[in-house]
Amino acid sequence: MFDISFYSANGEPSDSVRITAATYEWLAKSAFSKIGGASVETEIYLDEENVILPLVELNQDIRQQFKKIFSEAIISESDAVLTKLGDYPSKEEYQSGTYRLRKMLELLKCVENETYQYLQRI
C-alpha cells in the first residue's frame, strides 16, 4: 500500500489517501509523478512538533495540474466502471470495480481543499 498525504502549513489535521501498488503504478503512468518536480525537504508543524518531510508545495499552478489529472482519471474510470459492471453487479464486483474511481475522488477532494498546502507522494 502507498499513501498520498496532504498537509497544512499551520499544523491543522492532515489527510492521507491509501492506495494499492497497482493503483499507484497506474497513477504514476500519468503526469502525477512529474507535477511539482522532485519533492523538497520542508519543515512543517505536525502532531505538536516540527518535522521535515519530502513535500510538493500545492501552489495554484500545481494544484490545477493535479485537479486536471484526477478529474480526467475520474471521467476515464467512470466510463470503464459503467461498461465493466453492467446493470446488476454483485457487492464484491461493485467494490472491486469502483475502487480506483473512489480513490481518485478522494484525491481530488484533498487537492481541492485549500487547507492543504503540501502533498507527499510515498
Image (tube, rainbow, N blue to C red):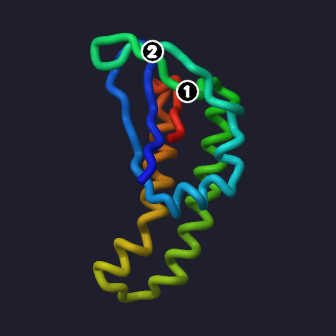
- 110 or 51: which is nearer to us? 51
- 108 or 16: which is nearer to us? 16
Chain-order first, disc 1 or disc 2: 2
Residue at the spot 45% in from the left edge and 32% down from the top edge: 6
Q: Are marks 1 and 2 in contact (CB under 8 Å)?
A: yes
Residue at the spot 54% in from the left edge and 17% down from the top edge: 42
Residue 1 coordinates in the image, percent (x, y): 41, 54
Residue at the spot 50% in from the left edge and 54% down from the top edge: 104
Residue 98 coordinates in the image, percent (x, y): 43, 69
Secondary structure state at the residue bearing disc 1 = strand
Q: Amino acid at mark 2?
A: Ile
Checking the image for residue 55, the label placed there is 1
Q: Amino acid at mark 1?
A: Leu
| Number of dots carrying numbers | 2
- 75 or 15: which is nearer to us? 15
Residue 87 coordinates in the image, percent (x, y): 41, 87
Mark 2 Cα shell of 10 Å, populated few (<14), some (14-19), many (≥20):
some
Q: CA distance from mark 1 to mark 2?
A: 10 Å
Residue 97 coordinates in the image, percent (x, y): 43, 74
Q: Is residue 23 left or right of residue 61?
A: left
Checking the image for residue 44, the label placed there is 2
